[in-house]
Image (cartoon, rainbow, N blue to C red):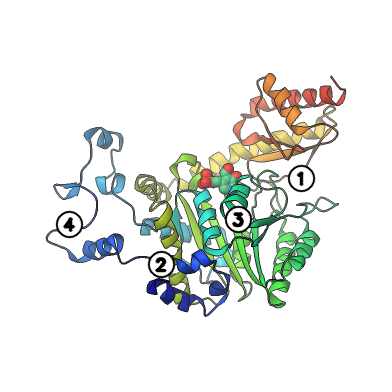
Amino acid sequence: MNPLATELNQVLDTCVAGRLLSDRGRRLYFPKGIVAQGAEAGKLAKRHNATIGMAYEGGKPMILPSVAALTPGLDPVESVSYAPVGGVDELRQLWKEEMIRKNPSLRGVPISLPVVAPGLTPGISTAAELYVNPGDVVIIPDLFWDNYELIFTDRQQAKIVSFPFFDEAWNFNLAGLEETIRKNSGSGKIVLLLNFPNNPAGYAPRKNETAALAKVVRDAADRGVDILAIADDAYYGLFYEEGTETESVFAVFANLHERVLAVKVDGSTKEDFVWGFRVAFITHGSKGMSPEVYTALGTKTISSLRASVSNSSRLAQSIMIRVMKSPTYQAEKERKFEILRGRYAKVKEILAHRKTGRALKEIPFNSGYFMSFLCQGISADTLRRRLLDRGIGTIALQDRLLRVAFSSIEVGGLDELYREIFQAADELSAGK
Ligand SMILES: Cc1ncc(COP(=O)(O)O)c(C=O)c1O
């Protein structure tokens, strides 16, 4: 073990973070190598800085004129230079302030400074690397983004244990969660991953459900179980109904119990409609956690990133800094939100008045990009292929769900889209 890793582990071993770290997580450290020495020189080498692997001209990073022409208004430092491994500090601060504004329960609660990752996917993979050992159980409700399989089962060699997302009354299945935690807490460690608004269900908990969810996790912690609670908040903010919880579950878990370590993975990807920018964040929170522990966790996090993606796009981060500081930022987002809410409302109206497609049962949805149909007596994949023949793209999951991304379809196209889906389903039900 590198002595720098040992030093970090000693800090983390004072609390739940150390107990949750995976073997790989324990080995990670940030080398006092090129990046650290370069950062030191950035502050002190006022005469000649010959450290970092970049090229300079006239005191600025070299830039091709055609690149400069496409990035007017941005200094070459903002457009082409490397970003720090953990992200540009100003963006990290801005994101944290915005997170607290959107989640008022976090006000006054110590949490880490978000670390930038190039997308939520590497953010989740980083959390997996830090905390999940081969063979560990990762509890995820059974409606989940299919990439979790690749990340946790195949890459990390962990075991995803699921329970039905909804109970019989079509509420979030708290009893299922409680039972699954109970059955799998023998090792004293639980990894829980929750994604609201959910892909593919399009569901976020109602306000009363969040408190009950917190109770289930707190009870397990009271029984002596250490819990890593990962919140995948990719679709955060797209809440269309009154009464839906608008705070992230991270806001609850970050101040719940000394045995609960919460990790929030979120980002500009979907919240700011910049899918290909690859700007996301990893934030830690745990009740009573000291600033030293948060710093050590930040170092472990950037160490993992240094070994995988090294750093995230500077250009995208520079644009997001400007965007988040723009006086029109909130209003611009609000307008896009209203467009998506309009599509959601249209889908609800279509479903309320439909007379066909009875083999398709919509599962409850109130948020996000998606809604899904449970296919009864017909194969979801056969339906998907039948729709493709008609020039319509949908996603079949587990051969029982048909996921429709209504976020991608203009309001004017939704009637036709759903008419085709119902017709195709009716044909299949009739054996045609
Ligand atoms: C639930 C969920 N998490 C994460 C992601 C990936 O986000 P990113 O594109 O930032 O890696 C997606 C994308 O589809 C998603 O649906």
Question: What residue is disc 4 on?
Answer: 50
Crowding near pointer 3: few (<14 within 10 Å), some, many (20+)?
some
Left of 77 or right of it: where is 171? Answer: right
* Residue with the most extreme right position: 430
Nearer-N-terminus badge (4/2):
2
Name of the residue lying farthest toward the bottom: 14
Disc 4 and disc 3: Cα gap in Å?
42 Å
Q: Is mark 3 within 8 Å of ligand 1?
A: no
Q: Are marks 4 and 2 in contact (CB under 8 Å)?
A: no
Q: How far separated are the C-alphas under marks 2 and 3?
A: 22 Å
User: Of callouts 1 and 4, which one flags the residue occurring earlier in the amino acid sequence?
Assistant: 4
Residue on which the image places disc 2:
29
The mark nearer the N terminus, 4 or 3, is: 4
Q: Callout 1, which amino acid?
A: Pro
Residue 188 falls in image quadrant: bottom right
Q: In front: mark 3 or mark 1?
A: 3
- Please give the residue where the numbered disc 1 appears in the rendered image: 364
Q: CA distance from mark 1 to mark 4?
A: 59 Å
Of residue 268 and residue 230, the one placed in the foreground of this image is: 230
**In terms of sequence position, does the residue under pointer 2 or pointer 3 come before the other?**
2
Disc 2: CA contacts within 10 A as few (<14), some (14-19) or many (>=20) = many
- Kindly identify which numbered label has been placed on residue 157: 3
Task: Give the amino acid at mark 2.
Answer: Tyr
Q: Earlier in the sequence, mark 3 or mark 1?
A: 3
